[in-house]
Image: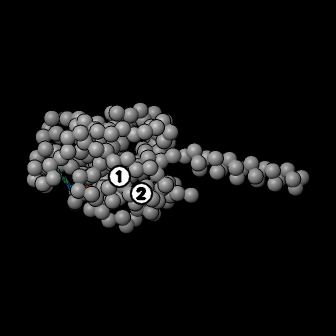
Amino acid sequence: MKTKIITLIALLLCGTSIYAQDHKTLVAYFSWSGNTQHVAEYIAKETGGTLFRIEPVKPYPTEYTPCTEVAKKEKEDNARPAIKNKVADWDSYDTVFIGCPVWWWTAPMIINTFAESYDFKGKTVVPFCTYGATYRDETLAKIVELTPDAKHLKGYGVIGRDTKGITEWLKEIGQLKK
Ligand SMILES: Cc1cc2nc3c(=O)[nH]c(=O)nc-3n(C[C@H](O)[C@H](O)[C@H](O)COP(=O)(O)O)c2cc1C
């Protein structure tokens, strides 16, 4: 009897660790001035996820006002700015964090390009964003809207690059590294 119980516990422990190894997380983000990158790096550290920086083929202007003008035009044109890089081994990820700054009250159009470039069936998407003052919830909702085939977990948004509260949020949604 004792041997049976020990064998059962060993099997259960083995099963749990196989699950933990199999569960893979991607932290995909777009960042223009570094805030979202900072937050994405923090999330990757806390979840054990792999970082993927969404890189535009045509870089945005480095000056603030010209960048806002390009971003505004892309939004008005419902543009799909091309992405330079590709996620390696997409199928191996179960959970995909998608993060971006708020641009003109919503996600930058390059997030549309990203969402339309991959198959989200069977994935769990977790939205996150950084912003100056407004439109956090609309931006998180936009990321959900852009990935209709995925399941979603509660998202999170921070002002600037403030990482306060992120660990608690990740714990709440069950994404902290074991
Ligand atoms: C083109 C553009 C549009 C923006 N629109 C908004 C906005 O609608 N609401 C807001 O709160 N912040 C807005 N911001 C501020 C950014 O969301 C904020 O600074 C963000 O943290 C920048 O992230 P990043 O450093 O990863 O690019 C805008 C910034 C830019 C460049």
Q: Going by the image, does 45 lie left or right of 99?
A: right
**Secondary structure beneath label 1:** strand
| Towards the viewer: 132 or 113 | 113
Q: Name the spot of residue 100 as percent of width and height, x first.
A: 29, 50
* Residue type for callout 1: Phe
- The residue that label 2 is drawn on is 43
Q: Is residue 106 above or below residue 44?
A: above
The residue shown at (33%, 39%) is 85
Ligand 1 positioned in quadrant? bottom left
Q: Name the spot of residue 128 as percent of width and height, x first.
A: 35, 52
| Towards the viewer: 71 or 146 | 71
Q: Are marks 1 and 2 in contact (CB under 8 Å)?
A: yes
Asked whether the viewer can see residue 150, the reply is no
Image quarter in which the C terminus is found: bottom right
The residue shown at (30%, 63%) is 161
| Towards the viewer: 153 or 59 | 59
Of pointers 1 and 2, the one earlier in the residue sequence: 2
| Residue 128: image tag | 1
The residue shown at (37%, 55%) is 40
Q: Crowdedness of circle 1 by 10 Å Cα count: few (<14), some, many (20+)?
A: many
Q: Going by the image, does 83 lie left or right of 152?
A: left
**Secondary structure beneath label 2:** helix
The residue shown at (59%, 48%) is 21
Asked whether the viewer can see residue 115, the reply is yes
Q: Name the spot of residue 1 as percent of width and height, x first.
A: 89, 52
Dot 1 beta carbon under 8 Å from ligand 1: no
Give the Cα separation between the discs numbered 1 and 2.
10 Å
Q: Name the spot of residue 166 as percent of width and height, x first.
A: 41, 62
Q: Crowdedness of circle 2 by 10 Å Cα count: few (<14), some, many (20+)?
A: many
Q: Residue furthest right?
A: 1
Front disc: 1 or 2: 2
Q: Going by the image, does 5 lie left or right of 59?
A: right
